[in-house]
Image: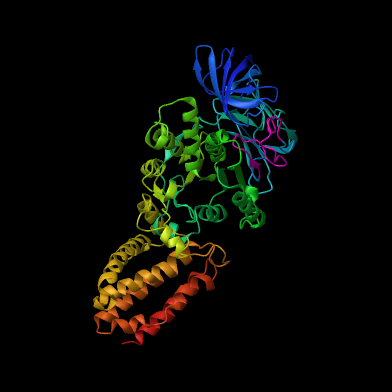
Amino acid sequence: MATRSVPGGRVVRVNGPLVEVEGLEHVALLDVVELGATELSAEAVSISGGLVTAQAYEYTGGLRVGDPVVGVGRPLSARLGPGLLGGIFDGLLRPLAGRSRWLSPGALAAGDRRPPVWRFVPRVGPGTTVGAGTVLGTVPTAAGIDHRVLVPPGTVGTVTWIAPEGDVTEDEPVATVDGAPLGVTEWWPVRVARPTHARLAPSMPLATGQRVVDLLFPIAKGATAAVPGGFGTGKTVLLQQIVKWADADVIVFVGCGERGNELADALTELAALEDPGTGRSLLERTVVIANTSNMPVMAREASIYTGMTVAEFYRDMGYDTVLLADSTSRWAEALREFSSRSGALPAEEGYPAGLASALAAFYERSGRVRTAAGGEGSVTVIGAVSPPGGDMTEPVTAHTERVVRGLWSLDRDLAYSRHYPAVTWRRSFSRDGEAVGAWHAAAGRPDWARHRARALALLAEADRLASVVDLVGLAALPGRERMVLLGGRLLREAVLQQSALSPNDATCGDGKQFALLDMVLAVFDRAVELVEQGVAPSAVEDVDFSGMTRVRDEVGPDDGPGVDARRDEVLGVLVGLR
C-alpha cells in the first residue's frame, strides 16, 4: 500500500494516550499519524473542525504541546510477507526481538529487524494472465511451509516480467503486472477484512487433541469458540495446549493484555516442542503477537485486528489457520479506557455502546472460504474471556456467547478439584456437533454422534442424581440410578480429565478418544444389565475400575487398540459377577 505524505500539524493537548492536534489537514478518520520527534505511532479517531484527536499506540511520556505531527496517509496497516512465521511482534506487527524497551518513547519507531533477504522461487512466467490471489512464486521457510507470494487484491493483468530464482529483499520487486511492480511484501489495513471468492459451510472438525473439546463440544475449521472462565480456571493452559496440538497449518497467538511471564513460559515451551510434521520447533509455524499487560494499553485494541489480518493472509495462501486471542476481555477493557478518555457516553458497566457490534465484527472475519485464486483456506477463531469475579453474565461474556459457534466454559469447582481441562458440560455448547458427526460418519465412525449424545445425557443425569444423593443418600437410590452415578464418574475420570504434563495424555488422537468413550459406555451398559438381572449395585460399585482411569496415561496418544484391550478386561471382570 502506497504511503503519501500529509502536511504536518502540532500537538495542542496530551491526555495519556489521547493527543489533540491542530493544523493537520487532509487526514481521514482512522489514518495513522506520527507524533513528535520520536515519531510515536497514533491513529486519528476523531475529527472536529480543525482539531484531530489521535490515540497513541506507544508511551507518550515526554510529548509536549507544540511538538510536530505528520500524517502517514494510510490507515493502521500491517506489513505482510516472509518473516512472520516464528516471529514475535507487538500489536502493530513490529518485531520485538531484541527490543525490550517498549516503554521508552519511540523505542519501536525505527525500522524492524526482519531478515533482509529471502529466497524467491518463481511459479509463473512472462505472459501469464494473473488476478488477485494468483501465486507468483514461493519463499521457502524453516517450518516447511512455503510462503506463497500472491498477487494483491484488486490487481489483474498480464505478467510482463518475473524475477529469476534467487535472493530478494523486501523492497525489491519480483514481478511486474501490466507495468505495476509487485514485491514479496504488501500492506493491508488491519480493520478491513481481506476479500474472498465465497464462504463455505464448516464441515471438517478442528482436532485440538483435547478430549472434552473434540468429543463433546467440537468446532469445525473456520468456526468460532469462546473460553470463558474466572482466575485460576486454566484458560491460558488450555489455549496453549491447542496451540501445541491443533490440526492447523499456521497458528496465530495473540497475547492481549495477559501477564508477560505466562507468555514467556509459553514461548519457551513452544520453542522446545517438536512439530510432529517437520521434526523442528513448533514455534517456527506460529506467529506470536505479544501485547502484555505492561505494554502500551492502546496497542492492545489493535492487536486482535492485527492477528486476524495475519491469519487471513495465510488463509489466502490456502492454509488452515487458527487464531487464539488471550484474552478478548483485556481488549474490551482497552475499548472502555479509550471511550472514557474520549468522553463517549458509557453503556453497561462502562463499556462503549458499540461493544457487541465490535465483538461480532471480529468473530465474523473467521470462516472457511474459497480464496480469490480458487483454493480453500480457513480461519478458526478461539478467544478467551476473563469475566471479573467469574461473573458469566457480564457484558463481554454475554455478548460473546451470542456470536460464537462453540462455548468451552471453565468451572471454578472443577479446577479446584484438579479436574483439568476444567471445561464444564453444564454451560458449554457446540453448534457444529451435527456437521462434525456427519464428518465422522463419512470417516468410518457412524456411532460417533450417538456416543456423544449418550455421554452428554449421562453427565446431565448424573449431575441431577448427585443433588438427590446429597439429600437422601446413595443407598436410597434404585440400582439403575446408582449405575448412572458410576457411569458419570467414569466419564469424568477416564475420558474428560486430561493431563497436560503427560507424554501419553497431553494430546489424544481421534482413535483413542473414541475408544475411551466407547469403553466407558460399554462398561456402563454392562453394569446396568447386571443390576437389572439382580446383581447387587454394591457388588458392581466394588469392582476395581482404576484400570479404566489409568489407561489414558498408559497407552500412546493414538493407541485405540490398547484402550479396547483394557475395555475387554473390565467387561470380563463384570461377567464374573453373574
**Foreground of the two, 476 or 513:** 476
Residues shaded magenta:
87-112
Question: Magenta stretch: dominant SS?
Answer: loop
279 relative to 111, above or below = below
In this rendering, the count of numbered labels is 0
Which color scheme did the rendering employ for the protein?
rainbow
Q: Is residue 443 visible?
A: no
Residue drawn at the location 54% of the way across and 34% of the way down: 302
**105 within the magenta span:** yes
Give the x, y percent position of residue 516: 44, 69
Give the x, y percent position of residue 551: 49, 73
**278 within the magenta span:** no
Give the x, y percent position of residue 172: 72, 28
103 relative to 220, above or below = above
Q: Quadrant of the N terminus?
A: top right
Residue 188, quarter of picture: top right
Give the x, y percent position of residue 406: 40, 49
Image position of 282 (left or right of 490):
right
Residue 201, quarter of picture: top left
Residue drawn at the location 46% of the way across and 61% of the way down: 415
Residue 486, quarter of picture: bottom left
Image position of 75 (left or right of 113):
left
Q: Quadrant of the C terminus?
A: bottom left
Image position of 297 (left or right of 399):
right
Q: Is residue 495 visible?
A: yes
